[in-house]
Image (cartoon, rainbow, N blue to C red):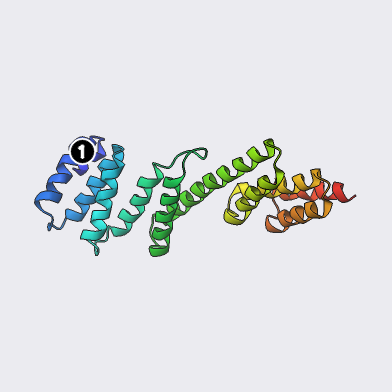
Amino acid sequence: GVAAAERGDYLLALEAFKRITLDSPLHETADDALVGLADAHRALSDNASAEDAYRRLVSDYPYSPLVPEAEYKLGLTFFQQALPAELDQSMTNQAISQFEFFLSTYPESPFAEDAGAKVLELRTRLAAKSYDSAMLYFDLHKPVAARVYLESVVTEYPDTVWARAALLDKARSFAAEGSKALAENEYQRLIDLYPDTEEARTAAAEMAALTG
């Protein structure tokens, strides 16, 4: 099974791993075979079967050293099904939840760094969706609703690049309305929260022009 998977013959690998998991569930390599089976399903984009196999390993072999890997790869299964920002984000949220569970349970895992990077990538996708909603409301000449979405980006996704853009746009929208004090407040938040960024330097220049 392993050799077949390594050369990309995942259908053959599936059959080999499946025989082991069905015929010898108590064999010492049964947990390896179950991960191999799940990996082959995932490589063939059979995500439902991959999810089932990873979950089976966790439930049937809870003391296996492969449990952390299965939990991480379960997150990958959801990650691969996550859709672009403009589409439904339920799978994105599921992937984030799984990766965050993995990171809290196995922080020392060699997969932890990649899981953390994927969480940030997915959170950035969710932030982009909220930011796009704000821009839509600006286009509809509804700045109050737009600023609600911008603020949600800042408070819910402060670790993403969209938070900086949201603060800058929020400040500019107040400035455009002549609300200098509110604009200054948002510019200052941006400068305080994200110093040494291009957005902070832009905010400082625009605030100086506004108050000068």
In the rendered image, the vertical position of residue 86 relative to residue 51, given as above or below? above
- Could you say which is closer to the camera, residue 50 or residue 26? 50
The quarter of the picture where the N terminus appears is top left
Q: How crowded is mark 1: few (under 14 residues within 10 Å), some or many (20 or more)?
A: some
Q: Position of residue 28 (x, y in %)?
A: 15, 58
Query: Dot 1 lies on which element?
Result: helix
Q: Where is residue 14 in the image (x, y as percent from the top left)?
A: 19, 41
- Could you say which is closer to the camera, residue 140 or residue 126? 140
How many numbered marks does the figure carry? 1
Give residue 3's quadrant in the image: top left
Q: Where is residue 121 in the image (x, y as percent from the top left)?
A: 50, 47
Q: Name the residue under label 1.
A: 4
- Could you say which is closer to the camera, residue 61 or residue 210? 210
**Residue at the image point whose x is 43% and y is 58% from the top:** 100
- Could you say which is closer to the camera, residue 175 or residue 210? 175
In the rendered image, the vertical position of residue 108 relative to residue 50, given as above or below? below
**Residue at the image point whose x is 25% and y is 36% from the top:** 7
**Residue that protrudes farthest toward the left in the picture:** 23
User: Visible in this render: residue 41?
Assistant: yes
**Residue at the image point whose x is 29% and y is 59% from the top:** 67
**Residue that protrudes farthest toward the right in the picture:** 212
User: Visible in this render: residue 39?
Assistant: no
User: Along the horizontal axis of the image, is 158 left or right of 61?
Assistant: right
User: Along the horizontal axis of the image, is 32 left or right of 106?
Assistant: left
Q: Which three-letter amino acid code belongs to the residue tagged 1?
A: Ala
In the rendered image, the vertical position of residue 149 relative to residue 106, given as above or below? above
Q: Where is residue 157 in the image (x, y as percent from the top left)?
A: 57, 53
User: Along the horizontal axis of the image, is 19 left or right of 119?
Assistant: left
